[in-house]
């Protein structure tokens, strides 16, 4: 959706100020800002199309209700209507905008009057230990691409990195001896990430086959390598990593479609099932709020319940 053209409406003007605040003061990522712009632009365009005045004081519960009814019937471009989660993102953006306005002393309706839609419990997909082993052993190790892919899979499972964090890694930033490195993750939050011994071994095996001096830890290897190509042109993209993992997932016929984020889920679930405390897992994943990490406890609680039902009271009587 295109941006709202320069417009004298109060809502359009203040929404841009809000986006500037997210970028400058909150340090939100370009993706987050893009999403907020999209959601707020959609609200403003709906106001225009509906002939509703665009002053801040005109935002009220009735207008928000009408907007939500319209959202619920909006086509998603795939033959259906917007899902409840996507509708929720629009509402969250509007609530955040109102909270910012109140913080800056504008007289607007309370964001607390806008209820978020009820969304069914998020289903966390993760791989069992056997599935992880099969996936990690899927690459063909006779090629440099295979060694690279093996190193990527080992790093993802041993760290729980987001794919966007993985592809930003530079080879000179990894402390191989200490098996760790620092990153700036989502929301500009810094954290230390730890590597397994196996992950370090495969990074070293991969790098030993690299005759180049490119900075990125993981680069593309298709076609002839031109030493004059800029570093960033050689860096793997998130989409490339996603396609690679999907390819191996299909190759070994996993019952779950593996993605970088499924490996992140698998990392977290593996730690919790082994007895790690949730606060430590939160730190390792780079979650801002503990509530985000708690989705994994639902998985481990189900596992524990199954174990209890299978074994409790089955001893000698």
Image: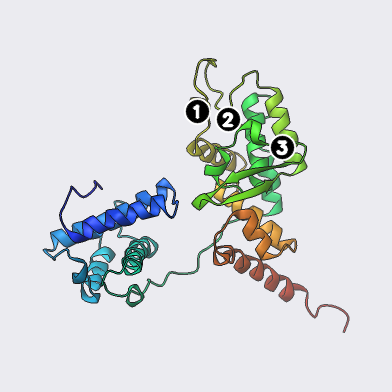
Q: Nearer the viewer, mark 3 or mark 1?
A: 3
Q: Residue at x 53, y 22 (%)?
A: 222
Describe the element under mark 2 as helix, strand or loop: loop
> Which residue occupies 62% across, 41% down?
252
Q: Seen in the image, is 260 located left or right of residue 317?
A: left
Q: Earlier in the sequence, mark 1 or mark 2?
A: 2
Q: Residue 282 placed where, x, y %?
A: 62, 60
Q: Position of residue 24 (x, y in %)?
A: 40, 50
Task: State the separation of the CA atoms marked 3 and 1.
Answer: 22 Å
Mark 3 vs 1: CB contact within 8 A? no
Quadrant location of residue 18? bottom left
According to the image, label 1 marks what residue? 232
In the picture, the disc for residue 216 is 2
Q: Tell me residue 268's x, y (percent).
A: 64, 57
Looking at the rendering, which quadrant does residue 145 occupy?
A: top right
Q: Is residue 257 visible?
A: no
**How many numbered callouts?**
3
Residue 175 numbered tag: 3
SS for callout 1: helix
């Amino acid at each position: 959706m295109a941006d709202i053209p320069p417009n004298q409406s109060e809502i359009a003007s203040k929404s841009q100020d809000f986006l500037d605040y997210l970028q400058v003061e909150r340090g939100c990522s370009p993706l987050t800002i893009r999403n907020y712009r999209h959601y707020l632009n959609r609200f403003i365009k709906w106001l225009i199309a509906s002939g509703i005045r665009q002053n801040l004081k005109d935002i009220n519960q009735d207008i928000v209700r009408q907007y939500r009814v319209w959202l619920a019937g909006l086509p998603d471009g795939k033959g259906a209507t917007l899902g409840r989660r996507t509708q929720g993102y629009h509402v969250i953006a509007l609530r955040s905008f109102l909270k910012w306005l109140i913080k800056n002393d504008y007289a607007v309706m309370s964001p607390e009057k806008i209820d978020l839609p009820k969304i069914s419990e998020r289903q966390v997909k993760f791989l069992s230990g056997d599935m992880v082993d099969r996936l990690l052993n899927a690459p063909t190790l006779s090629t440099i691409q295979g060694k690279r892919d093996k190193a990527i899979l080992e790093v993802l499972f041993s760290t729980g990195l987001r794919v966007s964090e993985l592809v930003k890694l530079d080879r000179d930033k990894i402390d191989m001896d200490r098996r760790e490195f620092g990153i700036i993750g989502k929301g500009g939050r810094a954290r230390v990430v730890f590597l397994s011994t196996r992950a370090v071994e495969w990074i070293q095996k991969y790098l030993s086959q690299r005759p180049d001096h490119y900075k990125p830890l993981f680069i593309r290897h298709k076609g002839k390598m031109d030493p004059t190509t800029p570093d960033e042109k050689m860096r793997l993209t998130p989409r490339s990593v996603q396609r690679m993992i999907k390819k191996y997932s299909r190759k070994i016929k996993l019952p779950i479609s593996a993605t970088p984020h499924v490996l992140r889920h698998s990392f977290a679930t593996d730690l919790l099932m082994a007895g790690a405390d949730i606060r430590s897992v939160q730190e390792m994943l780079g979650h801002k709020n503990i509530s985000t990490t708690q989705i994994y406890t639902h998985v481990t609680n189900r596992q524990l319940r199954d174990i209890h039902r299978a074994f409790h009271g089955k001893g000698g009587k």
